[in-house]
Image (cartoon, coloured by chain):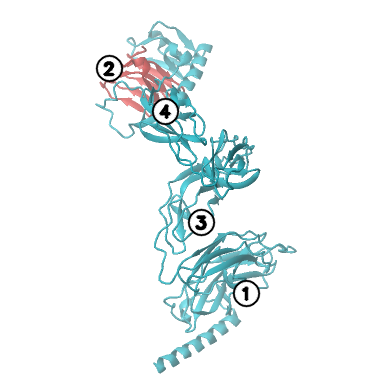
Chain colours: A red, B cyan
Amino acid sequence: MVQGNLTAAAASQVALINGAQAANVFWVVSGATTVGAGATLRGNVLGTGSITLATNATLLGRALSRTGGVSLTKAIAGL
Amino acid sequence: MTRIRQSSTLRRLLGVAILGWVGVAGLACENLDRYGPEAGGMAAPELSAVAASSTAITLSWTLPAGAEHVRVLRDGNQVDFVSGTGLTDQGREPASTYTYTVIALDGLGRSSPASAPATATTLNQGQSDDAPPSVPTGLTAVAASSSSIALAWEPSTDDVGVLGYRIYRDGAEIGLSAGPQYTDLGLTASTQYTYTVAAFDGAAHVSAPSAPASARTLATGVSDTQSPSTPLDLNAVPASSSAITLTWSASTDDVGVLGYRVYRGGVEIGTTSGTTFDDTGLSPSTAYTYTVAAYDAANHLSATSDPATATTLAAGQSDTDPPTTPNPVVAVASGPSGITVSWGASTDNVGVLGYRIYRDGVEIATTTLLIYADGGLAPNTSYTYTVTAFDAAGNESLPSAGAAATTLPIGTTDTDPPSVPGGLGGIATSISITLSWNASTDNVGVSGYVIYRDGVQIGTSVGTTFSDLGLCASESFSYTVAARDAAGNFSAQSLPAVITTLHASVSLGAAASFGALGGTGVSVLGLLGSQVTGNVGSSPGISILGLPLLNIIGGVLHLADATAASAQVDLAAAITAATALPVCAGHDLTGQVLGGLSLGAGSTSTRRLQI
C-alpha cells in the first residue's frame, strides 16, 4: 500500500528474490505511479491515479489505473 | 502595634465609606486595587448565577476564609456591596443576559482575586421557574484527614438552572457549595458523620435531600498517604453525533475513592463521583481519546488509565439498534456465599457500553467486563442469572437465557481444578485463526477458558471457541488453552496447537486479463517500441493516443466496452480488499528509504508505504 505517489527512479530496479513471483506482488498506490526511464518495476500496479512508464521502462506486471490514464514511451508492460 | 491597628481600622472605615458611595451612585469601578491591595492568602470566591424570574437573577457564592464583605459587579459595574453568600438582582430586563463577578474583602478592606465570571439569562416575559432541581445522586463521603471529610456527588439538573447545593451534616445545614463537591472541616477524629445534599435554583426551590453518605474521620495522627489504584477497563462508546459515554471499573484506595477526573486529549473536562461520564457538545464524525484518573479526599491522584477512543456518529445519525444478546451465559458457585457469572461478548452496530446482571429477575449490577462475581448469597441455594447488553444510546438487548448455579454447602471450599481441555484445533484465514476445543469438566463447574498464543495470554472465553483476529498472513502461531472454575482453580494448559495463517491474496477478477487498463485513456508515445502483454483498454474515458503503434501480445483493445467496465469494477474491489489487509507489526515502512531495502524473504504480508 502506498499512500501518495510511487516513483521508481530512472534506471532503478525492483528485484524479487527467493522465488517470489511478480504476479503475486501488488503495488496499491493512492496517487500517481511513475516508472522512470530505463527502470524495471516488478508486480501489479493497482493505482488510483495515472501510471506513466517512461522511455525504455519495464513493468513486469499489470498497469491498472482506476481514474487516471496509462502512458507508455517505448515501454513494456504486462506479465 | 497599637498604631498599626488604629491605622488599619481607619483604612477599613474609609474603604467602606468609599464603597458605600460607589454602590449608591452605581458608578463603574474598573480599578479593583483602589480599595486596597489583594489579601495574600484569600482565595477567589466561587460564583454561580441563575435566573429567578423574567426580571431577576439570583447569585450565590462561597466566602473564602477571612472574607467579611463581597462586592458584586454586573457587566463590570459594581451593583452591590453586601455580607452573606448571595443576593437577588432585581429590576432586570426579560430574556436578557448578564455577567457577574464578585470580589471578597477581608476585615482590612483587602480584596480577594475576582471570581470567575458567571452568566445568566432572565426568563422570557410571562415565564416562571416552577420546578425544583433534580435530587443529587451518587453522593460520596470520604475522610480527608482526622478533622475533615470530603464530599462529591453528581450534578443536579433544573429546567432553568441549578444555583448551588446545601450541605447537611447529621440533618443540620452546615454550608453551601456552587459545584458538586464540598469539604467539611473542623471535625472530631475517629468519628462517623452522615451527610446529605440538596440542590436549589434561582427561584429558591430546593430539591429533596440526596440519599445519605457516611464517612469516619481518620484517627488522630493518621493520614491518607496512598493514591488510589489506576482505573481499569475504560470504555468509550458514541451515544449520538454529539456525545460519547465513558465507563470504567472502580479504583480502590486505602481510605476511599472520592471521584474521578476525566481527560479528553489529555485535558481535564470534568469530574464524577461515579464510574460513568457523558461527554456532550462534541462534533459529528470525530474521534476523541479519553483517559481517567481516580482521586481520594487527600487530593492524591492515581496514574491515568489506558486511553480509550471513540468516534461520534455522523450528523443526523442516531443509534436505535440494541446490542446482540450475551451468549453463552455460565454461572458457577465460587463458594458457600458466591457465584461467578460470565458470558460471551455482545456486538452492537455502534458499540457495547456494558452489561446488566439480573439475579432471579432483579438487576443487581452493571459492568463493562464479561464476568461478574456475585457475593453475600445464602449457602446451598440456587440462583438464576440473566444478562443484557446496553449501548451508549440506552438501547438494551433482550435478556440472555437463564444460567442457574447453587452455592456450595456452608464450610465447603472448591480446590479441585477443571480437567485439561483436549482436542484443540483451529481454522485459519489470512488474517484470523478461530480455535475450538472440547469442554473441560469440573466437580463444581467450569466458568471459562483462558487462551494463550505463544505462551502469552491473549483472551478468555466462556464457550469452547475463540477467534484471534488481526493476524499476519503466512505466519505460524502456537496456541494453548486452560480451563478455570469460579473458585479460581486453573487446569494445566492443553497440548499446543500450531496453526499457520493463509497467504494473503488479492483477486483481480476481470481486471486480471488486462496488461494495461486506464480510467481516462491510454497513450503510446515515442513511436514504435511499446509493448503490452494482455488486453489493453480504458473505461469510462477513451482518450487514446498512438494506439496503432502499440504491440499487443495475447490480447485485444477494449475501449469503454463492457469488458473494460467490469474490469474497472473488479479493480476497485481489489484495491478496497488490498487496502483492508492488516499491516502487521514491523511491516510499516512509512518514512524508510526504500532503495536497497530487502523485504522479509518468503513473507507475503502487507507493507504500508507513505511517500
Mark 2 or 4, nearer chain start: 2
Q: Nearer the viewer, residue B229 or B412?
A: B412
Q: CA distance from mark 3 to mark 4?
A: 41 Å
* Badge 1: chain ID: B
Nearest to the eye among marks 3 and 1: give it.
3
Q: Which residue is mark 4?
A: A30
Amino acid found under the numbered disc labelled 3: Gly
Quarter the N terminus of chain B occupies: bottom left
Q: Which mark is residue B270?
A: 3
Q: Is residue B134 above or below residue B283?
A: below
Amino acid found under the numbered disc labelled 1: Leu
Q: Residues within 10 Å of mark 1 (few under 14, many from 20)?
A: some
Q: Nearer the viewer, residue B97 or A17?
A: A17
Q: Which residue is mark 2?
A: A18
Q: Secondary structure at mark 2?
A: loop
Q: Nearer the viewer, residue B379 or B287?
A: B379
Nearest to the eye among marks 3 and 4: give it.
3
